[in-house]
Image: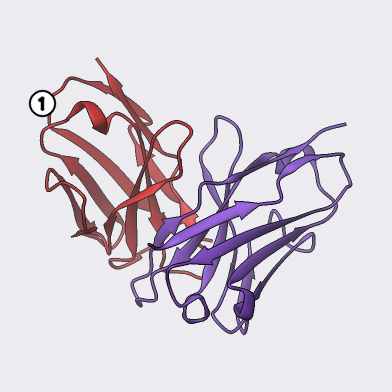
Chain colours: A purple, B red
Amino acid sequence: EVQLVESGGGLVKPGGSLRLSCAASGFTFSSYSMNWVRQAPGKGLEWVSSISSSSSYIYYADSVKGRFTISRDNAKNSLYLQMNSLRAEDTAVYYCARESGDPLNWFDPWGQGTLVTVSS
Amino acid sequence: DIQMTQSPSSLSASVGDRVTITCRASQSISSYLNWYQQKPGKAPKLLIYAASSLQSGVPSRFSGSGSGTDFTLTISSLQPEDFATYYCQQSYSTVFTFGPGTKVDIK
């Protein structure tokens, strides 16, 4: 079964740091680009960042550029999001999602999400 | 960045109703358009990819159409389990963007 499981969320003070992880199983992780998508409480989905299969191509939303770093370890089948200089507006459920690998791209599956709360 | 809009932002419908949700892109995105369903407290689920292709396991009452800038998600006969929020997403650019969502609730 293809599965993504996020971890690492929690309560952090403004200006603090947190590292999220996403453990992948049931597919050849090293063959797929991966993404982070977040959802603030009661709000819609916001794409955060993507990384290609070999880490050659990395993209960020303007809202997190310069503060967040996406990375992956294909040997460990894991995706990461290092979040620094956190702000209250970064409070959200963070999902990892696999890209399809098709030129007409889509996200499937998604993990269950991990909650990040930025508050003093 | 490509901006996505959806209409309506919410709708109330009854079981058995035909429901149509519209998504518009700020520039042409060909068929690089996907639809997701999200229920409260759950992760989004892929329904339609490449504008009109039904994801495996998704009921055939769901359908998608459109290309360029205007797209539609149609539920032919609304079922109780379809009450949820629906999001469109463009995958034309490397900066993926989602629409603001359409909440479908019970009339």
Between B73 and A5, which is closer to the camera in this rendering?
Answer: A5
Image position of B25 (left or right of A38)? left
Q: Position of residue B102 (x, y in %)?
A: 36, 34
Q: Is the residue B86 above or below the residue A42 in the image?
A: below
Q: Quadrant of the C terminus of chain B?
A: top left
In the displayed structure, A9 sits above or below B104; it is below
- Would residue A8 be found to the left or right of residue A45 on screen? right
| Residue A6, image x, y percentages | 60, 53
Q: Quadrant of residue B73?
A: top left
Query: Which quarter of the rendering shows the N terminus of chain B?
Result: bottom right
Q: Is residue A30 visible?
A: yes
Residue A42 in picture, x, y percent from top left: 55, 29
Label 1: element kind? loop
Choose between A33 and B22: the one closer to the eye: A33
**Observer able to see residue B2:** no
Instruction: Residue A106 in the image: state x and y as whole percent.
Output: 38, 64
**Left or right side of A108 for A19:** right
Quarter of image, res A47: bottom right
Q: Which residue appears at 45% of the width and 78% of the height?
A: A28
Q: Find residue A96 and report its image quarter.
A: bottom right
Labels in figure, total? 1
Q: Chain of mark 1?
A: B
Query: Which amino acid, by three-letter code, is at mark 1?
Result: Gly
Q: Which residue is mark 1?
A: B16
